[in-house]
Image (cartoon, rainbow, N blue to C red):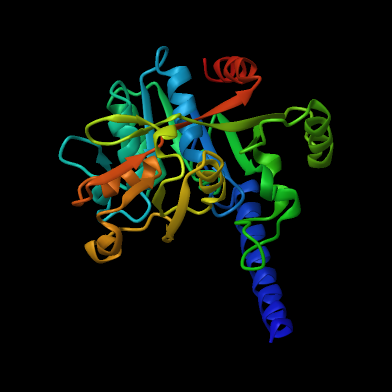
Amino acid sequence: MKLIKKIIFWKLSLWFYFITFLRNKFYDFGLLKSYSFSTPIISIGNLSVGGTGKTPMVEFLIGNLEHKYKIGVLSRGYKRKSSGFILASLKDDAKSIGDEPFQYYLKFKNIMVAVDEKRKRGVTNLINLGADLIILDDAFQHRRVLPSYSIILSDYSNLFIHDSLMPSGTLRECKSGYQRADSIIITKCPENLSKNEMKNLTSKINLKSNQHIFFSKIIYSNHLISKTNSIKISNFLNKKVKVVTGIVNSRVFIKYLEDKGLVVSHAEFSDHHNYRDIDLIKFKDEIIITTEKDYVKLKNFNLKNLYYIPIKIEVFGQNDLVKILNSKIS
């Protein structure tokens, strides 16, 4: 049975290879048109289906560039209950614009956040509204808009060079697609990643002369945040907690909590899950810890002890990255 499954997956991956290969070649040769804009555009994406840390990377860019630019963040708003172009406002929530855009909207007050399944239209509308820098969230495969600078992310524990096309692996397109990126950032690296290992990984990726590579790690807050207060994680030492996640890869998140001495029971849902009362009724009275992305959806439920952990990323050599970005988009 396993052999049959492998053969089926291999054949499906082969078909997927031809489809994505031809689509990219159509764009490369101009048979499918890409549109460029005079306003600078930074694209954040990945070769895999998700779980590489795009959301904290978008927030990293906002935090480092919002003092200089009027930023417009554009997402398709995955799994939202709406369609068309929407500029985030007070009337919106995770259902109307998607969990990640809603998180950006709540967190950053001096930027515009919009969703549109048609990226070209969305970019045009944000520019007309006054944005002088566009950040495209999860747009590496959306080639209709030509970015000024393109960044792809790859999880340290599942590097794209060791991965394969769906459904055998998690790649959305051929590995060679990385050559379209201006920078590659290896995310979720261990704390003790050595310079020798960075050099070794860099040599395996085989960068083009105009490409840059950076490495980053996740920084977790030492505090849990609720609607009303902030509590040190150490206060939950040896306590049983229910961890609720609807993300692609919760491995690092769970490990962090366990390393902090929490007794974790994990309720795992699919990525971008739209929570319902029935999903939560079994543990609504327990101490619940979740991700910030899930929190924006869970906070409106009747959960007495709901907390999330703020995270950010630290890019090794981040001053160099910001300097490169400023030189490319100025």
Q: In which quarter of the image is residue 101?
A: top left
Decide: is 320 above or below 4: above
Left or right of residue 11: residue 119: left
Question: Foreground: 135 or 28?
Answer: 135
Above-or-below relation of 72 to 295: above
Q: In which quarter of the image is residue 218?
A: top right
231 or 183: nearer the viewer: 231
Q: Is residue 267 visible?
A: yes
Rendered residue at 51%/51% (across/down):
250
Q: How many marks?
A: 0
Where residue 82 appears, as percent x and y from the top left, is 25, 54
Query: Measuring 70% from the left and 82% from the top, which residue is drawn there?
Result: 2
Evaluate whether residue 38 shows in this view: no
Residue at x 25% of width, y 63% of height: 281
Q: Picture coordinates of residue 238 (x, y %)?
A: 46, 44
197 lies above or below 80: above
Q: In which quarter of the image is the N terminus?
A: bottom right
